[in-house]
Amino acid sequence: MLIENRILVVDDEPQVCEVLENYLTMEGYKVFTTTSAEKALDIINKHVIQVVITDLRLPGIDGIELIKKIKEFDPLIEVIMLTGYPSIDSAVEAVKLGAYDYLTKPIDFRKLKVTLQKVFEQQDLKKRVTLLEDKVEGRYIFEGMVGQSIAMLEIFNTIKHIAKYPATVLITGETGTGKEMVAKAIHNQSPRAGKPFVTINCAGLVETLLESELFGHVKGAFTGATRDKPGLFEIADGGTIFLDEVGELSLSVQAKLLRALEQHEVQRVGDIKPKKVDVRVIAATNRDLKKMVQEGKYRKDLFYRLNTIHIHIPPLRERAEDIPLLSEYFVQQLNTEIGKNIKEIKPEVLEHLKKLGWEGNIRELKNVIERAYIMTTTDSIKLNDLPAEYVGEISPSFEPIEDLEPQTTLAEMEKKYIMEVLQKTAGNRSQAARILGLSRRSLYRKLKKYGIS
């Protein structure tokens, strides 16, 4: 379940809110309560709510008007009407406006329980129908992401649904599964789309620099701080900040991040005045934050703040049906970028790719397809075009040592192999280095060693 089942209770009697909150919490729901329609609309705008249980008679905006506004904002939110004054007319009007059901006070909790079970079962059924429609109609590409597995189609639909809310999102998944692409998709689908999307890798900086990068610093705050510098939270104001590898934050930086999330303000290093910011935070990690909380390595309050909405991206090996689609998509991209006009990947290649482990996930698959694309000498990608380590005993298509004499030295074989790869890549040294499994610096040294221009 990507989003826990959430219910908003709206009643002008606080004791009714309290009783319903206690009961629904015991039933396993996440519950929000308020005594006015105006506050209810504010909660709905900020949090992903599936069901609203509201009294008919409310101060200011009444229950009937509240249903209208809820359905205008999100037709998928179901509304259950409560009233102590049963009226056929009001019941009919509520149902016409889209209310799911109409219950009278005093509340029959058994009936409420059954009604809620039916609501969530119906919502799950609608989701499954939508996913099947997407699958049948071939809606497999979304915001640059590709997938036909139910898991990926569900992620696409979740992104569409949650994007309009400002709630914090935690994206989990192994390295290379596309966590940043999911974060960008959420931003692009949101009302913040025209504002900055700022990314920072929390594992890429030492603690002192990370704090300065996130929150900024003032001149003289530390050695080397020769001027005031805004942090990424300030730069992202009005937009979205993506905190990659958020599991790598130190406890002290975690505390400051929690303050930014709760108070909507940041304080530059060395400054005494906080600054207000309006930023949506999307965080990602390949670590088990819940386990880190239990071990005392991660703040429990920050974890719950980040985990408002959770999206988990399964590894590629668990959704093998996406591999052919991804592979063909990468070839289309390469045709546009490089222009070799490769027409197909042979079926046996696609079947072989589906059987591999892909520890590096989509990133690794993309690299393998790129290497095969460059190495093929025909208009299709065959098994022997794949890197040797991915096909066992199958040798590369260009067979670089075929015409060598038995007395050929290892250095001569290496030189010939490098020259063949350079020829295949039209002299592109970066691509050649990737195919050879070398850094660019190592390749340059070998070019110099063998006198290859």
Image (tube, rainbow, N blue to C red):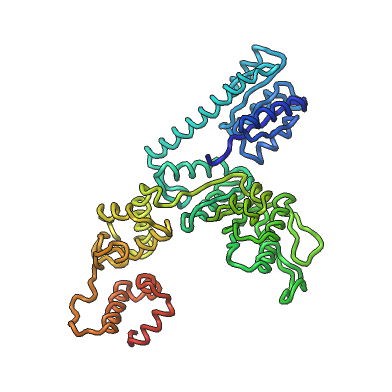
Residue 161 to residue 77: above or below: below
Please name the residue shown 40% across and 44% down the image: 149
Q: Say left or right for 219 vs 185.
A: right
Viewer-side residue, 298 vs 45: 298
Residue 345 place in picture, x, y as percent: 28, 56
Name the image quarter holding the C terminus.
Answer: bottom left
Residue 76 place in picture, x, y as percent: 56, 32
Viewer-side residue, 221 vs 392: 392
Please name the residue shown 73% across and 58% down the image: 266
Q: Say left or right for 443 vs 216.
A: left
- Name the quadrant containing residue 210: bottom right
- Name the quadrant containing residue 274: bottom right
Residue farthest front in this picture: 295
Please name the residue shown 69% across and 37% down the image: 43
Viewer-side residue, 265 vs 412: 412
Viewer-side residue, 56 vs 176: 176
Residue 158 place in picture, x, y as percent: 52, 42
Residue 443 to residue 117: above or below: below
Please name the residue shown 64% across and 20% down the image: 109
Residue 388 to residue 81: above or below: below
Residue farthest right in this picture: 272
Residue 450 place in picture, x, y as percent: 33, 86
Q: Say left or right for 201 vs 407.
A: right
How many marks overall? 0
